[in-house]
Amino acid sequence: MQADVGKIYEGKVTGITKFGAFVEIEPGVTGMVHISEVANTFVNEIKDHLTEGQQVKVKVLSVSEEGKISLSIKKALPPPPKKEFKGPREGGKQGGAGKPRQDKQAPKEPQTPESAFEDMLNRFKASSDERMGDIRKNMDSKRRNTSRRRG
C-alpha cells in the first residue's frame, strides 16, 4: 500500500523519539511525525503530547523515493482560531504615549481574509508613517540644536 500525499489517516503511535514519533497508518505502513509537526504550539517534549499506542489523525506531507513517509498531526487538525491584530497598546511607548486610539468604531460586517489583511496593513502603515514623522521632527530639532552650538 502506498500512502497518498495530502490524505488524512487514522493511525497508531508505535514509537517515540526525541525528534519525532512513528505512526502506523495501515498494517505494515509506518511514517514519522517530526517534533515540529506534533502540535500548533512549541513542543519541547513529545511525551507531553503523545503516548505509545495512542490513536491520532495524521496528514501525509510527503513520500520520499526511498519510501519514507513524512506525517503531520497539526496539519490534520482544524486550523487554530486566528488572533486579530489590535495594533500598539494604548499608553505604551509605541504609537505615541497616551494618545487615544482612533480605530474604535461600530462592528463591521465580516471581512474576507484579504480585506482584513489590507485593513491591518493600512493601520500599520499609518502608524509607521506617524512614528517616522516623529523621528524626523526629533532629528531635525537635534540638528538645529547642534548647529546653533557650533555657530
Image (tube, helix red, strand yellow):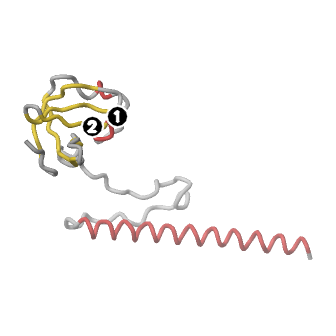
The x, y position of residue 31, in whole percent, is: 20, 37
Q: Which residue is disc 1 drawn over?
A: 43
Please tell me which of labels 2 and 1 falls first in the chain: 2
| Most foreground residue, 99 or 85 | 85
The x, y position of residue 109, in whole percent, is: 20, 67
Q: Which residue is disc 2 drawn over?
A: 38
Kindly identify the residue that appears in the image at 18 percent across and 28 percent down.
13
**Looking at the rendering, which quadrant does residue 118 occupy?**
bottom left
Q: Amino acid at mark 1?
A: Val
**Looking at the rendering, which quadrant does residue 67 occupy?**
top left
Q: Is residue 37 visible?
A: yes
- SS under mark 2: loop
Work out how far the residue at label 2 is from the one at label 1, CA to CA, in angstroms: 7 Å
Q: Amino acid at mark 2?
A: Val
How packed mark 2 is, by other alpha carbons closer than 10 Å (few <14, some 14-19, many 20 or more), is many
Q: Are marks 2 and 1 in contact (CB under 8 Å)?
A: yes
